[in-house]
Image: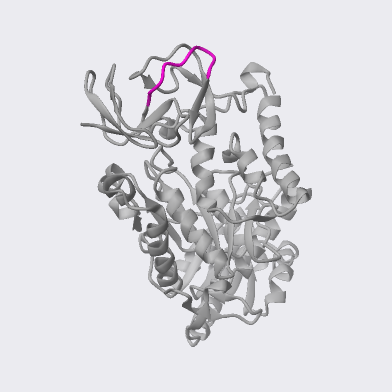
Amino acid sequence: MPRAIVLDRGDNVATLIDAGGAGEACLLQGETGGEVLLREAVPFGHKICIRATAAGAEILKYGQVIGRAARALAVGEHAHIHNIESARGRGDRKES
Amino acid sequence: MAATFLGYPRADGSVGVRNQVAVISIMDNCNPVTRAICQAVDGTIAVTTLFVRGQYGHDLEVAFNTLAGMGRNPNVAAVLLVGLEEGTTEEVARRIRPTGKPLEAINLQPHGTINAVAEGTRRAMKLVIAASSLRRVSTPMSALTVGVECGGSDTTSGLTCNPTIGAMSDRLIDDGGSVIISETSEFLGAEHLFAARAVDATVSKAFVDAVLRLEKEAVSRGMDIRGTNPTQDNIRGGLTTIEEKALGAMAKAGTRPLSSVLTYGEAPAKKGLHFMDAPAPAVENLTAFAAAGCQLIFFGTGVGNPIGNMVVPTVKVCGNVNTLRTMADNIDFDASSILEAGAKASALGDGLYEYAAAVASGTRTSSEVLDVRETAISRFAPTI
């Protein structure tokens, strides 16, 4: 069973430390336990959503903000650049 | 317990972990002669550089200071400067002279290539023979200043290699040594946590200002830094945003207070943990560490970045089981037991601290033996 590390109780993403296949159960380790069903294949080292997250909500890892949800994320979904946006150094958005 | 290492005492009171004769180019047009001399003389290292000719103002000062800083580095027993003409060569020479180490210079004008190589070879040979009579002596770990770096990062970096390096950093600082963390852009999103560790409000502000200045610069150019930082290989390795990368990168600096903020290549004036405001890419960042007098560098990697520094032995630490398999040649220290066997970063940090003493005493690193080493001084203005 692929394993994923949860670094803080408040986090809504976990990091896979094995590659996972679509439909596989993934074992959560670290600050929370349990299992999450992977909705798609997720490579080694990539993240999954472990708590349903609304579009625009903060993405938390290490208990810290690592970006915002570009759209709603479901539990077990691959969480990466296609659905998470950085909020920093974004000259393309002309925000400070 | 690794409280001491065997090092080479220098005239200025510093202690080297290597005993090389550095042949240093003053500018890019000198590199062919520098390489030819180093090819001919065992025990030398070729410190080449690009540009310098045509640089001016602050940008040129940084170049001269960095070249001289590498010459002053305690790992360098003696220096042979290879210049084009005596004026610019003297700019670097006068910045090295206060160390009291043997220093020679050869200029291409008016000797020409063949005579410059011949004369440079003769002088380098004598410097190497003289340096080889020096012997290592037992030295407290407090004599060490180490640079901590990460490159080719992925999500394992913030979980394995960087916390291991951080635990080692805490040990070294507790024993009276110094640690420098840098890579300004890689604090975007983590700066609030690091700023809170500053010894006072002035240091805190200087650090935050450096990070925000860099972000403002990126934003003012109307560009999105994604794809450049995090890089394409960072993203393939699972890192999604610069904030995520920064939170993992900061782990290399352990937990001790931030005592000062340094400029590019600037040596710390006191012991403890320091931040150097410098560009993140490894070659130019490691060059700044070498100029600042670091005797060792610890370099965490996830998806793999093999590069090391010419003057400073660079220890590659990796906790990604896949990279440890595919790029084993380039890794010196395995931190994969954190994810694979539930090992604690603090325990691995103790092991890395002992390894630091071993490398400081002469154990060679992969990037030294394979000569996977490069030098690049950051540019801060266009050439005229």
Examine the rendering and report whether any part of residue A42 can be seen: yes
Instruction: Kindly indicate the quadrant of the structure image that contains residue B78.
Output: bottom right
**Foreground residue among B283 and B145:** B145
Residue A53 within the magenta-colored segment of the rendering:
yes
Give x and y (percent) for residue B146: 54, 62
Placement of B143 over or under B256, stated as above or below: below
Residue B371 within the magenta-colored segment of the rendering:
no
- Left of B307 or right of it: where is B84? right
Q: How is the image coloured?
A: one colour
Give x and y (percent) for residue B242: 53, 32
* Quadrant where the image shows the C terminus of chain B: top right
- Left of B134 or right of it: where is B208? right
* Quadrant where the image shows the N terminus of chain B: bottom left
Instruction: Kindly indicate the quadrant of the structure image that contains residue B267.
Output: bottom right
In percent of the image, x 43 and y 75: which residue is there?
B361
Examine the rendering and report whether any part of residue B229 can be seen: no
Q: Which residues are magenta?
A: A48-57
In percent of the image, x 57 and y 72: which residue is there?
B142
Give x and y (percent) for residue A35: 28, 26
In percent of the image, x 62 and y 18: which residue is there?
A92
**The residue positioned farthest toward the bottom in the image shown:** B133
Give x and y (percent) for residue B65: 70, 59
**Foreground residue among B108 and B105:** B105
In percent of the image, x 54 and y 74: which residue is there?
B16
